[in-house]
Image: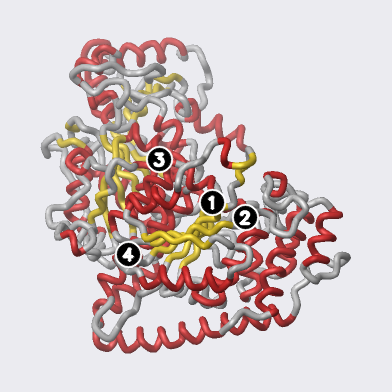
Amino acid sequence: MPYSKTDELAINTIRTLAVDATAAANSGHPGAPMGMAPVAHVLFNKFMTFNPKNPDWLNRDRFVLSNGHGCMLQYALLHLFGYALSIDDLKAFRQVDSITPGHPEAHDTPGIEVTTGPLGQGFANAVGLAVAQAHTAAVFNKPGFELVNNHTYMFFGDGCAMEGIASEAASTAGHLQLGNLIAIYDDNHISIDGDTKCAFTEDVLKRFESYGWHTQHVKDGDNDLEGIEAAIAEAKKVTDKPSVIKLTTTIGFGSKLQGTGGVHGNPLKPDDIKQVKAKFGFDPEKTFVVPQEVYDLYHKHAAEGAAAEQEWNKLFEKYGQEHKDLHKDLSRRLTRDLPEGWVEKLPTYKPTDKAVASRKLSESVLQAIHDVIPELVSGSADLTGSNNTRWKEAVDFQPPNLGIGDYAGRYMRYGVREHAMAAIMNGMSAYGTIIPAGGTFLNFVSYAAGAVRLSSLSHQRVIYVATHDSIGLGEDGPTHQPIETLAHFRALPNMMVWRPADGNETSAAYYMALTSKATPSILALTRQDLPQLEGSTLEKAIKGGYVALEDKEAAVTIVSTGSEVGICLEAVKFLAKEKNVKARVVSLPCFEVFDAQDQEYRLSVIPSGIPTLSVEVMSTMGWEKYSHEQFGLNRFGASGPYKEVYAKFEFTPEGIAKRALLTIDFYKDVKPLRSPLDRAFKQLI
């Protein structure tokens, strides 16, 4: 059907809504929405299937705006198609507590799939959504029941194309032959610094072609609606590789400043707004105008999406009659609940069990639970043998034609791409049928920090298996030994950072990571063997902190994490034997979870009346909340056998005992001595 005046009116309505919203906020980016309105109109109204009344319908097509600064484009579309965004929500653009924030946030706005803004993140999220779709389809689709066949569409701009994470993710998608992924590149030649010829002159399509993508170029993205439609239709026909369409557009189309950096990140001036509206056939004196025929056009397509969901529901009901177990499994996954009885599969340990590295204990958990939690998809950034993230029976997620796995496989080979791995996992989690876990060294979680932050911000249940967690990795030296990393990620809101000291604590970390539906986790795990603690249990450890060794006559509390807890327990023996001093030990594997316990419990673990010393072979930053004095490592590490490195920095029973005695001596005349937790609580009040 040829394009009509109504189509043109709809496109210009999107443009004027973006102009009005950014002007009302006196903030925002009108340029990208004005330039991308034609392709957005064609994509949403001609190709995408969705139901605005149920934004969570499984088989909806997904849309990701990687160049998230142009979010008024998406907000306008969501409003026009009938999602739960009113015209007043558009008027509240970028205002406090609105559901139209300055960049798209998945948990704020109905219809937003993933949280984007930092450039390139959305690109990688889209790859994750496509991975999840391919996997879910491979597991659940059966002859006569094509339950899952949606596409993921993604817009990205020059800024995303410049970011390294997009290159990592594009390379991954090409290798994986994700034919369900279609990206549209807004080739407008403008970034914040102006014309991209100052910094970005590569041939983007040749790069994507080398990655294994299908490529097309639509040269007139401002007007050629038929060309845009034909390119998307052609991309949908390509099922053995992802597709990218280079769309040459004019940023700020219609503005006096069109085609310049002046319209990228600044609202239009009042006189420019008036001439734009006049040019597009709108009353220059009116704001936030939506002609009824535009609502009618878009609501018609939304109704088609609702009807498609109704047909899907009938298919799913029939599927349940013929494939009961699969129907039950998929239905459960969509609630994000875990299967009954899975907790009994978690390994537990006795003090007499042999010493084992926590990375191996993590592997034991994965081996024990993978069958009972089929949505768990593990992987590694080229460190499988070091991260121990693969269970013995695992099949790789790979294109079937390579002969090394299939799309039903549950093990991801991310390659040396830590940042993309993290963002891809965010997309996988957002799809709703997968719990992703991915491994790298703890120090290189910092390489992925941008995406890790978005895991927290967007409430994704993602598990980062971070091995080689300290100077205990030894010979690789300071470049690989994390010092500041835990302080960094412990500072992230809504992030559980676990540093388990033994097998029970490792199982507890997985328990919390898997049961926390809206919180990601980092599991910091050792290369070196750890003894099983006498006082640990799963039940104690899931509180984030507990008393590992109690003594009511103790002169000092020593609080620690991970590999140092066992050394602290040896230090207590040394103090008793050599100095006739009694001490108690607290294991604090997760600050975030411990802080969530009630005040009475926390003060029972780290009480008032005696001084507290913290011990961790990391930066001491953050430990002031839990201890009066801190023994840590506020410098880079050293290369050598791990026991010698520990000895160099005096992380030995004798070294810890020495600092415990200094702590006791320093606070002997402080009466009453309040717990650091009590002090922090009073300050909070």
Label 4 sits on a secondary structure element that is: loop
Where residue 194 sits: x, y (%)?
64, 40
> Does any portion of residue 543 appear in the rendered image?
no
Identify the mark at residue 235; answer none if there is no mark. none
Vertical placement of residue 197 versus 672, above or below: below
Q: Quadrant of the N terminus?
A: bottom right
State which mark lies toward you, 3 or 2. 2
Label 3 sits on a secondary structure element that is: helix
Q: Residue at x 26, y 43 (%)?
A: 506
Label 2 sits on a secondary structure element that is: helix
Where residue 568 sits: x, y (%)?
28, 24
Give the alpha-carbon distance from disc 3 to disc 2, as whole Å: 24 Å
Among numbered discs 2 and 4, the one appearing first in the sequence: 2
Q: Quadrant of residue 358?
A: top left
Say which residue label 2 marks: 70
Q: Residue at x 75, y 74 (%)?
A: 290
State which mark lies toward you, 2 or 4. 2
Identify the mark at residue 448; answer none if there is no mark. 3
Identified by mark 3, the residue type is Ala
Where residue 331 sits: x, y (%)?
35, 75
Among numbered discs 3 and 2, the one appearing first in the sequence: 2
Label 1 sits on a secondary structure element that is: strand
Q: Residue at x 22, y 20 (%)?
A: 573
Say which residue label 4 marks: 338
Say which residue label 1 marks: 157
Identified by mark 2, the residue type is Gly
| Cβ atoms under marks 3 and 2 closer than 8 Å | no
Give the alpha-carbon distance from disc 2 to disc 4, as whole Å: 37 Å
| Cβ atoms under marks 2 and 1 closer than 8 Å | yes
Q: Quadrant of residue 129?
A: bottom left
Among numbered discs 4 and 1, the one appearing first in the sequence: 1
Give the alpha-carbon distance from disc 1 to disc 3, as whole Å: 21 Å
